[in-house]
Amino acid sequence: TTRRTVAVLGATGSIGGSALDVIARHPQRLRASVLAAGSNVDALLALCRTHRPDHAVVADESRFAALRDGLRAAGLPVRAHAGAAALDALVAGEACDIVVAAIVGAAGLDSTLAAARAGKRLLLANKESLVLAGELLTAAARAGGATIVPIDSEHNAIFQCLPEGRVDAGVRRIVLTASGGPFRGRSRDALVAVTPAQAVAHPKWSMGPKISVDSATLMNKGLEVIEAHHLFGLPDDRIDVLVHPQSLVHSLVEFVDGSTLAQMGLPDMRTALAVGLGWPRRIASGVCGLDLLAHGRLDFEAPDPQAFPCLGLARQALQAGGTAPAVLSAANEVAVSAFLQGRIGFLNIPDLVADALAALPAGAASTLEELRAADAAARRHALSALPRHAP
Ligand code: NDP
Ligand code: MG
């Protein structure tokens, strides 16, 4: 077998670290050839020492000299690059066969699109790029001949349950499971005063701060409904959501013959990453199998729409179509970051997103320019509306 080269975008993050862990278990089969981060040069340098890539990229151009000098001082034969254009060129070129798209937020869109257009195997964790530009991204992958392997655990589970990873006439519906986050079971009133520290303390998954807050509001599940729509081509009413607090069943597919297939495993993203990195073969991930006797039971319940309105807002944006999902996701990014900074309360997150959706009606979204403009307008609107939604 030939050794595949892997570009890990968002290498210094939670998914990036899990991807590098799996890659390092398969030195004959895989090699991390490109490592990219946003601005954290110290963490990127530490990864370069361990993984010895050919290229290291920092998105923040003001950090270029620090990266270059750090690599030199460490005597590492790694080429330093900075900026989004350099990253896109590396992703599209000969430097990698496989791209792990694990940058957080809309900042990941360009590099994800570049990988799709260039026909790479695209291990897609960056769900915001699908929410923002799902049609353009899946069309680019088709045109470029790229294979998208979803890394988000729910979509990876569905990918594993579907024949050839695709929905056909035999599929009735899919069911996304949700852990319910740290505030599962609380009433709306009991959510007024929750703090950022409480919101990021996820009971089952260890993740970056943005997606942890999204899990606490259930916006994460809303973004995942939109993500599933684009990945699997199903309408909103054939994508159901069930809260499953044990986080062992990662999602399910119901077929027309009455069969339901589920994928199960411990909540550890290395399993999904190994599915993508080894595809179409199974490779070791370092994750143990399930001891169902030790877990004992699996519970399922319906999500509470009063306490967690974000899921309904996301469905509303998907039904409205056009630029509405881009507005939802951009306003949510602004709201989550304001919440993490202590500027707004937890329940102000859905308020702010609803405000942006109401103020910016869905327009046509057939080009990247239209989507970028909607994203920018939603960020401006959300920022200006922040004071009105402060606690
Ligand atoms: P983290 O916050 O842990 O990591 C984010 C990464 O993105 C960091 O490497 C960061 O670099 C980098 N980054 C941020 N901004 C930029 C930029 N402008 N250009 C280039 N790189 C940038 O996030 P996670 O790993 O938790 O999540 C990554 C993505 O995967 C998200 O879209 C999330 O929704 C998705 N996902 C994550 C899961 C998880 O278990 N964590 C599960 C399912 C999906 P730096 O360190 O320099 O800031
Ligand atoms: Mg998920």
Image (cartoon, helix red, strand yellow):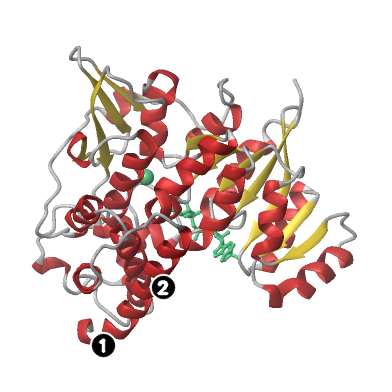
Residue 387: mark = 1
Q: Considering depth in this image, is 325 or 309 the residue closer to the camera?
A: 325
Residue 215 image position (x, y, % from top left): 31, 55
**Residue at point 9%, 59% (across, down):** 306
Q: Are marks 2 and 1 in contact (CB under 8 Å)?
A: no
Task: Report whether 231 appears left or right of 272.
Answer: left
Q: Is residue 327 above or below residue 148?
A: below
Camera sees residue 178: yes
Camera sees residue 265: no
Location of the N terminus by quadrant is: top right
**Residue at point 40%, 48% (across, down):** 134
Q: Earlier in the sequence, mark 2 or mark 1?
A: 2
**Residue at point 68%, 67% (across, down):** 83
Residue type at mark 2: give it.
Answer: Ala
Location of the C terminus by quadrant is: bottom left
Which residue does the numbered mark 2 point to in the structure image? 376
